[in-house]
Image (cartoon, rainbow, N blue to C red):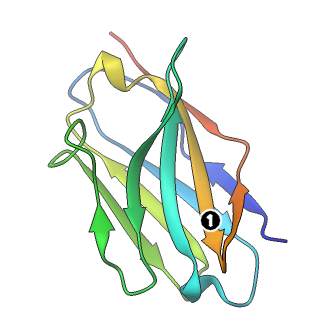
Amino acid sequence: QVQLVESGGDLVQPGGSLRLSCAASGHTFSSYVMSWFRQRPGKERDLVASISSDSMTFYPPSVKGRFAISRDNAKNTVYLQMNSLKPEDTAVYYCNANAFGDTFWGRGTQVTVSS
């Protein structure tokens, strides 16, 4: 069982930045594929960023160039740096771990982009 705890969600103005963190349990964190998803009001949960065990990253077009995912295996933590935030980035952001075929989710952290 992998436990994930997100933090860093906040209210931020358009154009601002925010960094989310996700702390994971487990002794083999470096082997996990870690991802961030988000769920906007009335929408499905969508992939925002993903990072493999060898730190290859993937972003959908909606966030590419604005968001950056990174990991610190020594701290069992994955980060999501979000820049140039837009009101449409408002969502609950979820951390996801794929560990040897099993998928785990955090409880989410709220990000609100509004003036």
Residue picked out by circle 1: 97
Is residue 88 rendered to the left or right of residue 61? right
For this rendering, which residue is in front, 108 or 9? 108
Give the residue at x 43% y 22%. Answer: 90
Is residue 13 rendered to the left or right of residue 107? left
Number of other residues with Cα within 10 Å of mark 1, as a class: few under 14, some 14 to 19, many 20 or more: many
Give the residue at x 43% y 45%. Answer: 47
Q: Picture coordinates of residue 95 (x, y %)?
A: 59, 53
| Quarter residue 63 falls in | top left
Q: Picture coordinates of residue 100 (x, y %)?
A: 66, 80
Secondary element type, mark 1: strand
Q: Quadrant of the N terminus?
A: bottom right
Give the residue at x 32% y 9%. Answer: 115
Q: How many marks?
A: 1
Give the residue at x 63% y 83%. Answer: 29
| Residue ranking furthest to the left | 65
| Quarter residue 93 falls in | top right
Q: Picture coordinates of residue 101 (x, y %)?
A: 66, 73
Is residue 95 rendered to the left or right of residue 113? right
Against 27, residue 62 (above or below) is above
| Quarter residue 12 falls in | top left
| Residue ranking furthest to the front | 101
Is residue 97 rendered to the left or right of residue 72? right
Q: Label 1 is placed on what type of residue?
A: Ala
Q: Picture coordinates of residue 105 (x, y %)?
A: 70, 53
Against 84, residue 23 (above or below) is below
